[in-house]
Amino acid sequence: MTTRQGHALPPLQTTGLSRSFSGFKAVDGMSLSLHKSELLGLIGPNGAGKTTMFNMLAGSLPSSSGSICIHGRDVTGQDARTRIGHGMGRSFQIPKPFPHMTVLENVLTGAQNQTGERLFGACFQPGRVRRDEHAAVEKARGLLDFLLLSHLEGQMAAVLSGGQRKLLELARLLMADPDILLLDEPAAGVNPSLLEQIMDRIVTLNTQHGKSILLIEHNMQMVGRLCSRVVVMAQGRELAQGRPDDVTRDPDVIRAYLGDAA
Ligand SMILES: Nc1ncnc2c1ncn2[C@@H]1O[C@H](COP(=O)(O)OP(=O)(O)O)[C@@H](O)[C@H]1O
Ligand SMILES: [Mg+2]
């Protein structure tokens, strides 16, 4: 969607977004824009309100006030499923795949249309899989290939390592063809070799597939390598924004992180 002046509307924009829990302001007036094909970092000490922000953006938590627009469309009152339909995909800080379903079946649960729902049943009745469902299976296989999990396709998700679960989570959310990705700490608890692979896939999704990505991440080395701009949150508010090198030198940002360690 473009404005009358021809400017592309930001894929994701919040204005004065807030959320309180029993009077405690976890997110307090956050106005944030994610630009088209941008890889924007959202950082800040523990408890800053980052995950609460994601929960509101994804539609799993109602906001107390403020608004959320996807491609210029106000989605503030819409549920998570409707937002997925508008192109929003979200990964969780701690992925929880269905442990007793195969890796492939887990990816298929990410399909958002009727095919996806039928497939869920078809997984247990292979004879009933139809042509469009075969297409979904092929798509899921392509995503598993992209995310380096093909060799585990038939394994129960329970056997996956923490890092592999993060890759599976990405495959699952890509099944719905989102153009906006909200990634909550994709590097947390991931071993160094898998970390490189996850970073590489995120960069590919951004640069080659044009996905607009909002990334919560504690690993500052990763943020510095991936993001050209970061927004720093502390105590529910925006504390700073700019290039990673600049914000990490900002005395207010350093103080906020030291406070976290104290
Ligand atoms: N469901 C909830 N009920 C009460 N307090 C919450 C809830 N979710 C988050 N909080 C509080 O809101 C603050 C921000 O939490 P969170 O968004 O998880 O921070 P971050 O992801 O930046 O570490 C914390 O103080 C947390 O304890
Ligand atoms: Mg968090």
Image (tube, rainbow, N blue to C red):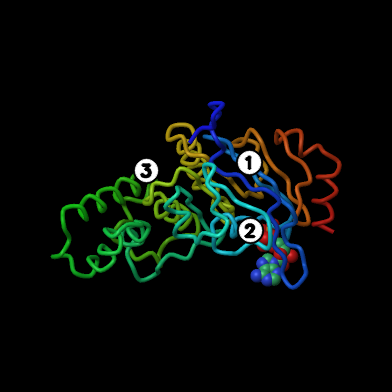
Q: Earlier in the sequence, mark 2 or mark 1?
A: 1
Percent x, y of residue 117? 30, 64
For marks 2 and 3, give the one nearer the viewer. Answer: 2
Q: Quadrant of the C terminus?
A: bottom right
Q: Label 1 is placed on what type of residue? A: Ser
Assess disc 1: are there few (<14), some (14-19) or many (≥20) residues with their C-alpha within 10 Å of its C-alpha: some
Tell me the residue that label 2 is attached to: 51
Rounded to the nearest angstrom, the CA distance separating label 1 from label 3 is 29 Å
Q: Label 3 is placed on what type of residue? A: Phe
Percent x, y of residue 35? 58, 36
In the picture, measured across the screen, residue 168 lies left or right of residue 31, that is left
Q: Label 2 is placed on what type of residue? A: Thr
Q: Nearer the viewer, residue 260 or 116?
A: 116
Q: Earlier in the sequence, mark 2 or mark 3?
A: 2
Under circle 2, the secondary element is: helix
Rounded to the nearest angstrom, the CA distance separating label 2 from label 1 is 17 Å
Rounded to the nearest angstrom, the CA distance separating label 2 from label 3 is 27 Å
Give me the residue at 63% from left, 49% from top. 217
Q: Nearer the viewer, residue 30 or 66?
A: 66
In the picture, measured across the screen, residue 11 lies left or right of residue 22, that is left
Assess disc 2: are there few (<14), some (14-19) or many (≥20) residues with their C-alpha within 10 Å of its C-alpha: some
Tell me the residue that label 1 is attached to: 33
Under circle 1, the secondary element is: strand
Q: Is mark 2 within 8 Å of ligand 2?
A: yes
**Residue pushed farthest top?**
5
